[in-house]
Image (cartoon, coloured by chain):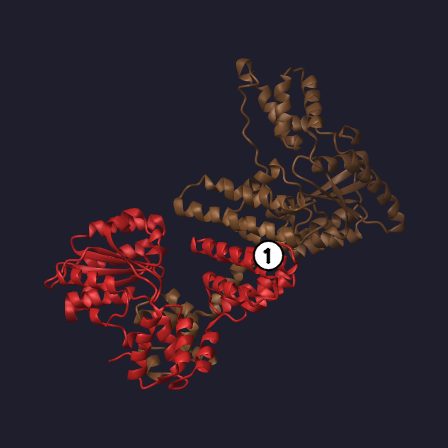
Chain colours: A red, B brown
Amino acid sequence: MVSKIWTEKFRPSKFSEVVGQDEIIKRVESLTKSLNIPHLLFAGPAGTGKSTLALIIVKELFGDAWKENYLELNASDERGINIVREKVKNFARTKSLGKVPFKVIFLDEADALTPEAQQALRRTMENYSATCRFILSCNYSSKIIDPIQSRCAIFRFKLLEKKDIEKVINTIIEQEKLTITPEAMEILYEGSEGDCRRAINLLQATASISPSITPDLVSTIISNTRPKDIRIVLDYALAGDFQKSREKLLDVMLKESISGQDVVKAIQKEIWNLPIEPEIKVKLTEKTGEVEFRIIEGSDPFIQLQSLLASFVLAGLGKD
Amino acid sequence: MPWVEKYRPKNYSDIKGQSQAINKIKKFIEEFYLGKLTRKKKKAMILYGPPGTGKTTIAHVIANETSSEIFELNASDFRDKEKLKSILRPAIEQKSLTKKNKVILIDEADGISSVDKGGLSELISLIEETTYPVIITANDVWSKKLAPLRQKCELIQLKEIDYNTIKSVLFDILRKEGLFIDNKIVTSIAIKAKGDIRAAINDLQTISKLKGKDLNPDEIKFDERNKEVDIFSALRFIFKGKPSSETLKIFDSVQMPIDEIILWVEENIPAEYSDVELAKAYELLGKADIFKKRIYRQQYWRFLVYENALLSYGISSVKKNTKIGFTNYKKPSRILKIWLNNQKTSKKKSIAKKYAELVHIGQKRALKEFPIIKEIIKSDKEIQEKLGLDEDELAYLKQE
């Protein structure tokens, strides 16, 4: 049964179908053809093809039997490294049956593991190296401890270029019998931020309303997915009402389940629309960047965002 | 016999270092017996201050000075309203057998649990009806549960006792005991007591048992006595007072993990600071949080020093002037809100989980993109079937 979810329906299942990441595809394909892959580390932003490539590898290696020889785990969803180890242990207990002497374990978002958990993971990788190959995926390879990096072949995925996203979108437009204007395509690309999955999802959400994809329709869908109340949060702060501002912030974050990182992004974009002096906009942008950095480093997002809101309160008073 | 008992003051004049409070107390007692005629004055006083500043002692001195019998209640008597009534009523109604007067002492009122509301209201009606003075002692008079009491009582603060005063009391005791201890040792006992005269006297008695070279002032090591402080006092200390070496250590005395203390500080910064102070305070809080994260990541506990310093001294230092007045600090509400929200959004999570499995992404990612994903799932029955959504989940989608 073909999935009606387009990100699945149009997910490439052969190396030749993958759009972008040409260098990586070439190298991974030749590794796979040799039927012997090392542990792999895929680093790069979301929606650039890391999971897809892992799936292609196992399909190439195992053919129809890929499901029996492939374990997919998500580090940020599993509760602790012990669960991961347990699952790996159970999976690795039986040997691979076919011509390939190992099974493949894909650990998504490996950078969500703490350094200690990664140490434990390293030992697990060693213990089962005879029967298993690991493919780790992460957004930032710097958050993977060196001993793991040194055991893996590292591949760095880049954000998809505009022409790549357009190619993917056009394929779908054709097969699903949709129409799209160049302007709508432009907006779709902007909205995707180079994330192919997001681009496809946006397209499907838009197409669920009408098969002719117009700029207005795409814009509406995109703005529906953006935390729109962020402006209200900032307006409270600029008016000097810190208490209300932070209350609203928590409200928005909880109600829409948006992460701190997404809130920072939205704030960064909104700064340019605020009624404040250009010089202050620049200062606030710098501060926003610092806060985003801290959140990525793993700091408590709500605490960091409050410190950002406090800066907006000062900006509203004309102080800095 | 413990020296703290042996040398416990009997008369107002024996009490050292609390002259201001004593004057107030004398006036209160005088007016109380006049007020008995007019029935206008407050009939209870709260003696409040840190441990070892003489609260209980003063209550006994008052009884002695007014030739009264002391009728003492403690916090556990307040657990049961009926029981309290049965003890109290006879006490305020019956005349004392041997002495003319009575003093009712409620020692360590902080210990009255806030769930014992019945007991507390019984105490308040007692204060309204009593013909004898009621003396209440408490470490933290500003705690919320004592709020209804505060209005009915004269508040008398007992300050930490100055170290010079403690020192002279200690020398006085040594003289009476016929002992000699090096000035250096006595001084360090007095300093270390941090205003707690009971602690100082206990330490002195312990030290006096040492002999010969053990009494060498350079050899004696005192174990720091950590005075326990509740979070409200600690916050007051930081937000209102001048930063000092005490500020730096204040959270060590709070029985609460530092992760929780951070939340308390976070919640209450805007209650005290605004504008520039607010921004500076949050900046420091943010930095403290970074060190907290570094401790977890690297298991390097020395970073705790920085986390703690920024959180206490740092946040205390951002204000231009010390602050006065009473602030009602709030419990951190964020964790509760997150929990409540999680209850509300459990359906959303279960849908996201099913979706995430189907399309090889993490659940967090699916939640993040839920606004788009939701549109896709909503519009297509086949997808809903493939995901195996149950009725509750479908209902959730519909109302979204």
Say which quarter of the image contains residue A158.
bottom left
A190 sits to left or right of B99 = left
As rendered, which of A151 and B329 lies closer to the eye?
A151
B328 sits to left or right of A295 = right
Q: Is residue A251 above or below residue B188?
A: below
Q: Looking at the picture, how far across and down is residue B329, in whole percent?
A: 64, 53
Residue bearing mark 1: A310
As rendered, which of B181 and B100 lies closer to the eye?
B181
Q: Looking at the picture, how far across and down is residue B320, in whole percent?
A: 68, 45
Q: Is residue B323 visible?
A: yes
A110 sits to left or right of A316 = left
- Say which residue appears at 14% left-offset and 61% top-offset: A96
- Say which residue appears at 57% left-offset and 40% top-offset: B253
Q: Looking at the picture, how far across and down is residue A51, in whole percent?
A: 28, 65
Q: Is residue B246 above or below residue A164?
A: above
Q: Is residue A14 visible?
A: no
Q: Amino acid at mark 1?
A: Ala
Q: Looking at the picture, how far across and down is residue B230, in whole percent?
A: 60, 45
Label 1 resides on the chain identified as A
Identify the secondary structure beneath mark 1.
helix
